[in-house]
Amino acid sequence: MSINIYHNPRCSKSRQTLALIEHHQPKVIKYLDTPLTLEELKRVAEKLDLGVSAMIRPKEAEFVASGLTLASEPDDLLAFLAEHPKAMERPIVETSTQARIGRPPENVLDILP
């Protein structure tokens, strides 16, 4: 089973989640260096099963300035994330069938083998 972690090494929760799952040998994707495409964001959002708004860090300056809200249309939120990856909640762990936000880090354990 392939496992991706969308990781920000400057984030303590992201580092804690990575440490928790290291033995699964996840593919570490530094999403600030390699932002997700709109299609990748849609795929992850579908696997999260929480709605696109769960992927947004609503206090990020770019999001506040955008005029969007967490109740905005999902396609608008995804387009915003594609342009502003810094506003994506982190970390996100993705398997072939599911995804979880690692806040707290233990949230991701139920999708791992």
Image: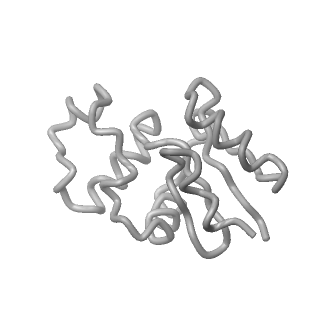
Side of 27 where 63 appears, left or right? left
> Where 60 sits versus 38, above or below?
above
> Where 63 sits versus 52, above or below?
above
The residue drawn where x is 57% and y is 46% is 105
Q: Position of residue 89 (x, y in %)?
A: 44, 43
The residue drawn where x is 61% and y is 55% is 93
Q: Nearer the viewer, residue 90 or 107?
A: 107
Side of 106 where 51 appears, left or right? left
How many tags in the picture? 0
The residue drawn where x is 32% and y is 30% is 60
Q: Quadrant of residue 65?
A: top left
Q: Quarter of the image containing the C terminus?
A: bottom right
Side of 4 where 43 appears, left or right? left
Residue at the bottom extreme?
A: 97
> Where 72 sits versus 57, above or below?
below
| Colour approach in the figure | one colour
Side of 1 where 61 appears, left or right? left
Q: Position of residue 66 (x, y in %)?
A: 21, 36
The residue drawn where x is 46% and y is 57% is 38
Q: Position of residue 102 (x, y in %)?
A: 54, 48
Q: Nearer the viewer, residue 25 or 60?
A: 25
Q: Nearer the viewer, residue 79 or 29?
A: 29
Q: Quarter of the image containing the N terminus?
A: bottom right
Q: Position of residue 5 (x, y in %)?
A: 66, 50
> Where 44 sits versus 17, above or below?
below
